[in-house]
Image: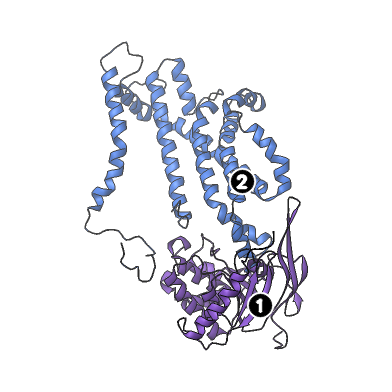
Amino acid sequence: MADPTIPILDMRGVSKTYLSKGRATEALRGANLTVRRGEFVCLLGASGCGKSTLLRIAAGFEAPTGGEALMWDKPIPGPGPSRGMVFQDYGLFPWLTVRDNIGFGPQSRGRPAAEVRETVERYIALVGLQAFADAHPHQLSGGMKQRVAIARVLANEAEVVLMDEPFGALDAMTRERLQDELLDLWARTGLTVLFVTHAIEEAIFLADRVVMMSPGPGRIEAVHGIDLPRRRDVSSPAFNDLRRMLAAQLHSHHAPKAA
Amino acid sequence: MSTGAETGILPATPVTPRGARPSLARLRGPALALVVPLALVVVWHLTTAGRPYSLIPPPAEVWAEMRDLAVGGVNDDAFSGTLWTHLAASLTRVYGGFVLAAAAALPLGLLIGRVPLARALLDPLLQVLRPVPVTAWLPLAMILFGLGPRSAFFLVFLGAFYPILVNTVFGVRSVEPRLFEAASMLGCTGAAQFTRVVLPAALPSIFTGLRLGLGFAWVVIVVGEMTGVQTGLGAIIMEARQLSRTEIVICGMAVIGAAGFVSDWLVMSLGRRLLAWSPSHG
């Protein structure tokens, strides 16, 4: 399973066309992407570039209409615990406490109660929510909700964490803190992360590789390895050079298209 | 209100201000609630007391009748001390009909909400039957179930059935799609999603339906007990009407109001406990 030569995720010419009321919309065309174990990959692009579609195909929420979506060399059969998803709108169960939200996955998979309890306490501590273990989601701030959402996929032993603009709805200060916390978790646990964002700075700050996508139809434009040492200084000249370069590339996609 | 904002963290429980007189503050609501009813009783008293030809008895007379109905010893007629018998009979029908309605409407609502075939088969029929008022069912109920308590049961059942059904269907159908995605990526799929996602997510709506249903059960009890039953608050009202004992009619109305209020309060308290997680119920 952990054969280092096999990528954990392998998208081969993945396309997605939606049919609605007899009209076809091409959301994604021929996307090729491999993600290796332990990598942090960001999908960067404007809205309509297919980045969320690609992520949802990796999650198994959608099946590709063309190409192959593989995990450990096998077709992704549908949503499952090996690929945990963190949504921008959290997707927490409002009737469950923080503790029970985090325990939902292990419980669903029939883990023994004692093990679930132990796992839950460990991950509550990992995201620093001990004081709120018995709170319900509506009592939490956005940043805390997203910590719960991250903890519940980690507690469920996800091999890949798929994140769909997870910090997009948070204020700037909370976002920066959660970015730091996420990198810290990633470094400590050896997670594999596929992270969708439309913020250039966020992508450069977080990713080993930034996958640039462009709209109309959605496709992968370029992939950039980010070699800056971590923790990255967003005000350093090297960071700024990258930011400028990616911005120029991103904006060139918005040049007037032939009608 | 900027204290504690450095973390962006909200307190898990609301902080109650200290120093304020909590006992007095807690009495404010009930005190305000009594203002208008008391004013109405005063107006009622002023317009009816001391007028022998008033068709509406004054409050003091109704109060005396209420005591007589409850414990006897005032008029010593056929009605004296019968209140509890009538109340018990009505309670049995209200809760019996309500429990039957819930037992039928909940599974049916879950089915219609979740299974497209069940929706296609049943929803149109139920939508056509829904606007038919309970009173219009009265003659048919008497033919189907005869004169007596079974008809009353049936009408209470009908009154409670639709609010429970409609709200259950609504609750089941309006579960946020995101929650199904969240459940399935966490490994909860198929039938397990029903008990772990659909039911809890629909619970606030289901609860609203139960509460409305119980309210309607009280509303239709008078109609239900017009079907020739001997006991019940509806029956006593109809009998008193025929004897022109308006004070008994008013007593019956007051008891129905009070009993309905108490039973709604009980359901609400239960709901607050079960639905503490829901911002709109907790």
Q: Is residue A20 above or below residue A90?
A: above
- Confirm whether residue B82 shows in the render: no
Circle 2 residue: B169
Q: Nearer the viewer, residue B27 or B143?
A: B27
| Image quarter in which the N terminus of chain B is found | bottom left
Distance from the alpha carbon under mark 2 to that under mark 1:
48 Å
**Residue B11 relative to residue A5: left or right:** left
Specify few, some or many for label 2: CA neighbours under 10 Å numbering under 14, 14-19, or 20 or more. many
Q: Nearer the viewer, residue B193 or B11?
A: B11
Give the blue chain's letter: B
Which type of secondary structure does the marked residue at label 2 adopt?
Answer: helix
Q: Nearer the viewer, residue B200 or A17?
A: A17
Specify few, some or many for label 1: CA neighbours under 10 Å numbering under 14, 14-19, or 20 or more. few
Q: Which of the colour schemes (rainbow, by chain, secondary structure, one colour) is used? A: by chain
Query: Which chain is mark 2 on?
Result: B
Query: Which chain is mark 1 on?
Result: A
Kindly identify the amino acid type of the residue bearing the numbered disc 1. Answer: Ala
Q: Is residue B253 above or below residue A29?
A: above
Kindly identify the amino acid type of the residue bearing the numbered disc 2. Answer: Val
Q: Position of residue A68 (x, y in %)?
A: 77, 72
Q: Nearer the viewer, residue B136 or A3?
A: A3
Give the purple chain's letter: A
- Confirm whether residue A205 shows in the render: yes
Q: Position of residue A234 (x, y in %)?
A: 47, 81
What label does residue A222 carry, if any?
Answer: 1
Q: Position of residue B129 (x, y in %)?
A: 65, 32
**Residue A17 relative to residue A83: left or right:** right
